Image (spheres, rainbow, N blue to C red):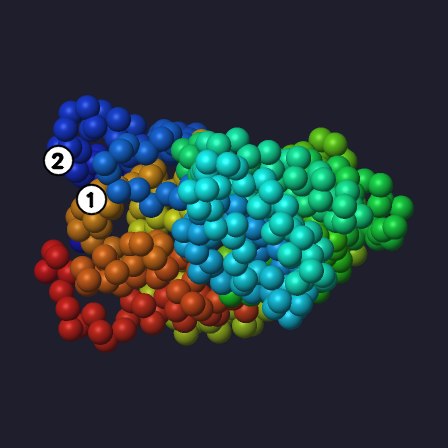
Amino acid sequence: MSLTIEETKARNKDLIKEVLEAFPDKFAKRRVRHLNTFEEGNSDCGVRSNIKSIPGVMTIRGCAYAGSKGVVWGPIKDMVHISHGPVGCGQYSWGTRRNYYTGTTGVDAFGTMQFTSDFQERDIVFGGDKKLEKIVDEIQQLFPLNRGISVQSECPIGLIGDDIEAVARKKTKQYDGLPIVPVRCEGFRGVSQSLGHHIANDAIREWVLNPAEAKAAEFVGTPYDVAVLGDYNIGGDAWASRILLEEMGLRVIAQWSGDGTMAEMENTPKAKLNLLHCYRSMNYVARHMEEKYGVPWVEYNFFGPSRIATSLREIASYFDDKIKEGAELVIAKYQAQMTAVIEKYKPRLKGKKVMLYVGGLRPRHVIGAYEDLGMEVIGTGYEFGHGDDYQRTTHDIKDGTLIYDDVSGYEFEKFAEKLRPDLVGSGVKEKYVFQKMGVPFRQMHSWDYSGPYHGYDGFDIFARDMDMAINSPVWGMCKAPWK
């Protein structure tokens, strides 16, 4: 029997209290601020966020280096990205998300290659500046078609004080203005990978956008130029989005970081509108371009037909009637396809309950796609969200939804055990825990090696994958803890 909203709120509050009773009082007082039951009218979901994780408790967060190298800079395909420091960080970040790109690896694309300065004890003692200079020279000799180099600093670089900025200026001058970008993203900075996003955005502003202003005369624009920011082309997501934007009459002059290039980054300030997909990782540079170049930005959501239609119309509102009519034509073109997908999968998924815990934008953006299939998101939270992320989430969640910020492994498992979701959507660190519990799971950082999930074509794949996860016969061979 389903619970009323008030009964749901009371149950969730009791659940939070029960979970916190397992912790020492001091710890419980700190964690209670991160857990809440959403009530309509609460502008920030009622949780604290972007606070340092408590030592001794497992967190799913990454570090500033991961936010810069693994998210923002790494997918820029025609640049070489040096992991400056010991080999461990570089090796771990090598097997990163599936940021699809075009080009020939090792010739004009380097996204799946790993470059590291491989710091040793000698480098810690005497510094790594000379070694970094040598690496840049070797890269120019081995990969002459690269369009730039970024230096992603690891923890020891900040501790010993390597002057990577001086090396960058020296080598940029030596190689006739080749962009060589120092990024002070040492892992110990900030409380999570989120500060790495901010640092990466600042580096783009200072070392890419500002120097590129002199090239403005070379760019020939149109009234319908847009740039896609914060789409990392996981499983081809950005390509699926570009199809819709171009079909409605817009010209995409840049997309980054996924399948992005140095030239596209330099051209972005010439756009008439910046389309922001991952707010958390790219809002900083979008705000900068609005303030300095007068380029407005709008956040969009291409998960599920309902949110796609809303976003297409909002994007079109920044342009003339030609684009507005184009948006309506695109929506109408795919209506039959979307109706067929929903008619196929909704009977198999209607009423199924979902718990989410992801980074970036997914804890709120994918909610509409689940709702299009008749599913209900009963709990959601961010790994490294800020207060404005939770404010935006209030527009997508229902009264009584359980909210958890930087949730610990114990809390997440107990919440799932009590709420009994039909599906959990989270990251690879949580995947096997819940599957061993007998709970269907989808890896919502990299789409579990599927995708794309964006756009109309992506929604068909999304619905299929959720159906396969929940209705697989394998779940009849194991039992969830509550059974």
In this rendering, position of residue 169 left or right of residue 12: right
Residue in the image at 68% along x and 45% along y: 180
Residue type marked 1: Tyr
Quarter-of-image position of residue 42: top left
Q: Is residue 417 visible?
A: yes
* Extreme residue in the right direction: 217
**Disc 1 packing (10 Å; few <14; some 14–19; many ≥20):** few
Residue that numbered label 2 is attached to: 22
**SS type, badge 2:** loop
Residue in the image at 31% along x and 54% along y: 429
Q: Is residue 296 above or below residue 73?
A: above
**Residue 124, percent across and down?**
46, 38
Q: Which mark is residue 248?
A: none
Q: Earlier in the sequence, mark 2 or mark 1?
A: 2
Quarter-of-image position of residue 297: top right
**Residue 419, percent across and down?**
21, 49
Residue that numbered label 1 is attached to: 410
Residue type marked 2: Ala
Q: Is residue 255 visible?
A: no
Quarter-of-image position of residue 252: bottom right
Mark pair 2, 1: CA separation: 10 Å
In this rendering, position of residue 455 left or right of residue 433: right
In this rendering, position of residue 297 left or right of residue 466: right
**Disc 2 packing (10 Å; few <14; some 14–19; many ≥20):** few
Residue in the image at 78% along x and 53% along y: 224
Find out whether the residues at labels 2 and 1 contact each other: C-beta distance under 8 Å: yes
**Residue 100, percent across and down?**
56, 65
**SS type, badge 1:** helix
Q: Is residue 74 above or below residue 197?
A: below
The C terminus lies in quadrant: bottom left
**Residue 389, percent across and down?**
47, 37
In this rendering, position of residue 462 left or right of residue 39: right
